[in-house]
């Protein structure tokens, strides 16, 4: 994973008030909770006192309470109360749960994965974060063109694959007429022009350029004409968000949430403004999500067979011109990884 990034890790709806949830994200067992005011907290699922899973505990006085000895922690990880020591005894400052900075926006829970918690500066399984940390950036990755009149419905899907490979699948225009020949690839030609691609600091956008094979030589990315604003395009934002801008009134957004090295959960949303009548809208989303699931599973069947699982900038693969968005993704991913560990 790329350190010092805001990762989407959960849907807001999954985290209930006064509830404790145990999840595995970014290769760590985590505990997630909300207090009575709805403020979320995320920490390693391990009490610093005796190593018990905090996800087996409960919310008490708006704090996360360990089920074993009743130690209470706030969202910053500070221990606020030790019952065995009594109310009058100050809590030692060194007793802290390993908590993560979290923010909530766009119906998602974001987690700041800093270099310490990522394990690039010290182990976090046995110590509290007392060494160097990077101050979280105030900017959460999101798509500014998703305006309020678009309504959405969500679904999730579990893939047994590294999140980088799942992301690359959504940057891959070469596979569409083959894997999706019965769905979104029907009628799409195998010859790939470009794709036309724009790169920016936080990600990239690209416009598919597939056409039928008439014996022509495909255009290179640098030969592609600038596309129309009405053309379908796709955008990826680091570290784990993607949008298919099908048309102004229809989008698909996916958060590729890393579980561990071999598992990823896709949080997929369909945004639209064409169907607004409540009953018809529900039917539309039901049909759309069923279709999306069929398309996802066409991909999943092959993506889970990647060898090796995690992507790298240099590996034993022979990429072609049509893989240009994947090449750019790998280069920027490598740059961010190096930048954030130096």
Image (cartoon, helix red, strand yellow):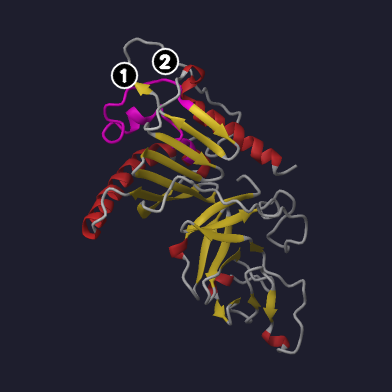
Q: As drawn, is 280 to the left or to the right of 34? A: left
Q: Does the magenta stretch include residue 179?
A: yes
Q: Work out whether residue 175 or residue 27 is closer to the camera in this orientation and state it.
A: 175
Residue placed at 26% from the left, 57% from the top?
282
The residue at which mark 2 appears reads as 218
Query: Where are the magenta residues, as a range?
Result: 167-196
- Quarter that holds the N terminus: top right
| Residue 251, horizontal then vertical, whole percent | 37, 44
Dominant secondary structure, magenta: loop
Residue placed at 62% from the left, 81% from the top?
70
Mark earlier in primary sequence (2, 1) = 1
| Residue 305, horizontal then vertical, whole percent | 44, 37
Tell me the crowding category of disc 2: few under 14, some 14 to 19, or many 20 or more residues within 10 angstroms, Cα based: some
Residue 279 occupies quadrant = bottom left
The residue at which mark 1 appears reads as 212
Picture layout, residue 162 above or below residue 221: below
């Amino acid at each position: 994973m790329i350190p010092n990034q805001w990762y989407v890790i959960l849907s807001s709806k999954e985290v209930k008030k006064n509830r404790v949830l145990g999840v595995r994200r970014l290769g760590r067992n985590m505990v997630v909770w909300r207090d009575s005011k709805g403020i979320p907290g995320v920490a390693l699922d391990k009490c610093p006192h005796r190593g018990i899973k905090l996800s087996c505990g409960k919310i008490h006085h708006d704090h996360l309470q360990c089920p074993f000895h009743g130690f209470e922690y706030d969202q910053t990880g500070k221990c606020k109360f030790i019952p065995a020591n009594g109310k009058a005894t100050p809590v030692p400052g060194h007793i802290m749960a390993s908590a993560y900075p979290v923010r909530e926006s766009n119906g998602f829970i974001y987690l700041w994965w800093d270099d310490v918690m990522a394990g690039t500066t010290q182990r976090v399984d046995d110590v509290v974060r007392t060494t160097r940390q990077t101050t979280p950036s105030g900017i959460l990755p999101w798509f500014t063109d998703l305006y309020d009149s678009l309504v959405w419905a969500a679904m999730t899907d579990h893939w047994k694959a590294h999140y980088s490979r799942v992301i690359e699948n959504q940057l891959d225009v070469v596979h569409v007429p083959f894997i999706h020949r019965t769905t979104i690839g029907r009628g799409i030609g195998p010859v790939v022009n470009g794709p036309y691609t724009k790169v920016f600091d936080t990600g990239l956008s690209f416009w598919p350029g597939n056409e039928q094979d008439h014996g022509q030589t495909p255009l290179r990315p640098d030969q592609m004409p600038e596309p129309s604003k009405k053309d379908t395009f796709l955008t990826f934002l680091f570290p784990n968000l993607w949008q298919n801008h099908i048309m102004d009134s229809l989008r698909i957004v996916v958060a590729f949430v890393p579980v561990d090295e071999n598992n990823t959960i896709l949080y997929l949303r369909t945004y639209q403004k064409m169907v607004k009548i409540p009953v018809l809208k529900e039917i539309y989303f039901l049909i759309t999500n069923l279709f999306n699931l069929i398309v996802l599973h066409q991909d999943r069947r092959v993506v889970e067979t990647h060898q090796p699982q995690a992507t790298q900038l240099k590996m034993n693969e022979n990429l072609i011109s049509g893989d240009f968005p994947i090449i750019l993704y790998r280069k920027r991913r490598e740059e961010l990884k190096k930048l954030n560990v130096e």
